[in-house]
Amino acid sequence: MANVATHPQTAPTAQPAPTAPAPLTAAEIAALALSLAHLGTGPQATTARRALHTLLDAPHDDVVTTTLATLTAPLDASTSDRARVVAAAITDHRVVRLCYGDAGANVTIREVEPVTCLVHRDHWYLVGWCRMRRGVRAFRFDRILAVESTGLRARPRRADRYLPFQRKAS
């Protein structure tokens, strides 16, 4: 029997029907992407990126094509290190302290409750609750100058509520 991965919504039942697999949610894609972000360039990382690319392989517009290329490309070493700290903080529900340079080169130190990461076009983003701004913010990884865990507990938040283009619950 071949090794087959299925989405929980399409797990085999007593009488499997030939249906298309359920598409991955934005939160699932973000989680996979973040996991791949800090794997580096080893053989497992290359294989995993190829698998993700295959999962998402379909005709796309320019934005999706660029985003997919960013999503499946390895990060440079320093960004990869920051991604590891962020991933651990998301998993452990810990607040991180960012040294962040915005588009205007203004540098701030912020405490952020990280929720998820996403990729849009050419850039990776950390999405979370910024305690300084008292709201949801997205931080470009290439503008995060330094990141460390504070050790403080962050409030658990559902990632799907923090991702763009999500439908509001009825």
Image (cartoon, rainbow, N blue to C red):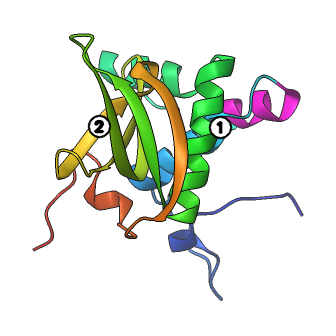
Seen at 35% across and 66% down, the residue is 158
Name the outermost residue toward the top: 105
Dominant secondary structure of the residues highlighted in magenta in the image: helix
Residue in front for this viewpoint, 52 or 34: 34
Q: Between label 2 and label 1, give the one nearer the viewer.
A: 2
Residue 130 in the image: state x and y as whole percent. Answer: 27, 48
Horizontally, residue 72 falls left or right of residue 30, namely right
Circle 2 residue: 138
**Residue 36 - label:** 1
Q: Over which residues does the magenta segment extend?
A: 42-50
Q: Position of residue 163 (x, y in %)?
A: 29, 49
Examine the rendered structure and indicate whether residue 10 appears above or below residue 163.
Answer: below
Look at 73% across and 37% down and name the residue there. Answer: 48
Type of residue at label 2? Answer: Ala
Q: Is residue 33 visible?
A: yes
Q: Residue furthest left?
A: 170
